[in-house]
Image: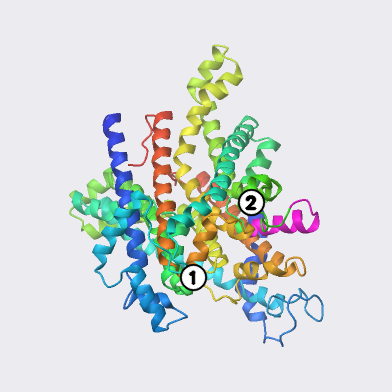
Amino acid sequence: VRSRFALGAFVIGVPLALALLGPLLAGEPGPRAPSFTLGGGHWLGTDFVGRDVWRQVLLGGRSVVLVALAATALAYLVAFPVGLLSALTRRAWLEELLMRPLDVLLAVPSLLMILLVAAVFTPGAVGLTLLVALVNIPDAARLVRAAAAEAASRPAVEALRMQGETWWRTAVGYVGRSLTRTLAADAGVRLTGVLYLVATAAFLGVGVEPDAADWAVMVDRNRTGLFVQPWAVVVPALLIVALTMGANLLVDAGLKTGLKTGPKKGKRT
Amino acid sequence: VSGPRSWIARRLLLGAAQTAAVVLLVFVLTEALPGDAAVALAGDQPDPERIAAIREAMDLDRPAHERLVDWAAGLPHGDFGTSLASGRPVSTYLTDGFGPTLLLAALTVALLVPIGVGLGVLAARHEGGPVDRLVSAVTLGVYAVPEFAFGVLLVTVFALRLGWLPPTAVGYGTDLLAHPAALVLPVLVLLSRPVCSLARLVRAGMIDALASPYAAHARRYGVPGARIRYGHALPNAMAPATQQLARTIDWLLCGVIVVEALYVIPGLGTVLINAVAERDVPVVQGLAVVFGVTTVVLNLGADLVARRLAPRSEAAA
């Protein structure tokens, strides 16, 4: 397992470092050169509008990583209270009201939902974050509800109730806290899915400017010059592959250690 | 909890509710625009003539609920309205793009099940050995990689460096079956994520099933290994995999859109992306309904099959 951690950390290291530190190192933009050229002081050549590809690579990772992190956090911010409330409420109609609409939302493919909204609005980075969070809420809320329902049926909760503890202490203090491990496991898996979705949406032109410094946009826009200047496509594509692959390897290694050392399993259903 | 018949009835009811919700959601998301929808949709060309034309074409002067009822009533008859951009019926867009997309999806599904199940069984048979570790590492690594990044790298290697395959399907028209070389990379990319997911699930299920008491019992009775593996363990291992099929279907639909954009295949995904770029709302609505209802129906089918394979398991509903 330790070797898996090392492998994951190694694979994700380069793209993550570039995404977080790249914008600090990028410096001022140089003068525009002709499109799709190699050499001429440009280490990786120039892109479709004659910008330096290396500089675009340095700038282009931040948006993917930040949008993915924000969207994952936001999805839980909504899913946690909804799932917890519907698991702990004794009113059947409230549970139905909270969960049924989510069952229905779950049926719509995530990318389709994003494209539908993009057809009418022109979402920016914030809009894309909200959309990606929205399509992740149903599944996350179901997971929270299932785990919380299990925790709420334990004798400890009955004891807390008989002691006359407040609803808040029982719900958040005990049931909420007992979900930490399950949620940590799910958050890792969800983050890799969100990374995929954010990059794919950007490739299809949702939530980004057409000439944005973004790895996915670079792959899309520089494809026309693939036969002349492959670096402008290959380098950002490799970085995205390394980012998603590394994240998945790390999450898997984390899950395995969590399962081995943890007192109880955080099993996904 | 309750009998099989009431479970099926509940599941069918959920499917019907989901279909209705997809239709409603598509309409609300695309027509619930703040302010004047015609002005918003005209976007870059806000001249009064175009705005009037859009208002006329989409009947925007009538109340939204009347338009919803008319539109939804037309759907079962294949009447999806007319395109804002070209004035052609949306149904002609659907029939034009249907062939290539169906071909891609059918090829992918036909290859997905044997490859995914085969890899999973192979890894489970050699649990802990080098074959298992190789299969597990590769399926885990590729599983989360976006299709467009993977696909563009394959194009660079196989079309650009080696020159074995065409980089895109440009120039082949809609009759892709006559040019199988142009289909190799798209199908390979489309398979990448679902195969990994299926292989991992089958591997885990097979390992559990082969370690179970009934498999040990069959072995004691001298039942041949192949029969235990394929007759007894595999159906049990397939049940959790079938339930995860819902996610696989979601991935396939997303994948089709991306792969068609990447390899310039004139299917439904390309039609959808073009319509999104042109803000051609009726075409987007029609395609979204087709994609959404397909997902609902396939999910329903997957749940029914999973229930059949392992009646004890609690499928979603």
- State whether residue B222 is above or below residue B229: above
Corner quadrant of residue A134:
bottom left
- Seen at 50% across and 32% down, the residue is B237
Three-letter amino acid code of the residue under disc 1: Glu
Q: Which mark is residue B278?
A: 1
Residue A134 inside the magenta-drawn segment: no
Q: Which mark is residue A245?
A: none
Characterize the magenta stretch by its predominant secondary structure.
Answer: helix
Q: Which percent across, then down, holds residue A143? A: 38, 50
User: Would residue A43 appear left or right of A167 to someone viewing this image?
Assistant: right
Between residues B15 and A242, which one lies in front from this camera angle?
Answer: B15
User: Would residue B135 appear left or right of B208 to someone viewing this image?
Assistant: right
- Seen at 52% across and 44% down, the residue is A260
- State whether residue B118 is above or below residue B27: above
| Mark 2 or 1, nearer chain start | 2
Q: Which residue is mark 2?
A: B186
User: Would residue A86 appear left or right of A5 to someone viewing this image?
Assistant: left
Please, which residue is most extreme toward the top here?
A: B221
As helix, strand or loop, the secondary structure at mark 1 comes to helix
- Seen at 48% across and 73% down, the residue is A125
Read off the magenta span: B149-165
State the separation of the CA atoms marked 2 and 1.
25 Å
Between residues B73 and B196, which one lies in front from this camera angle?
Answer: B73
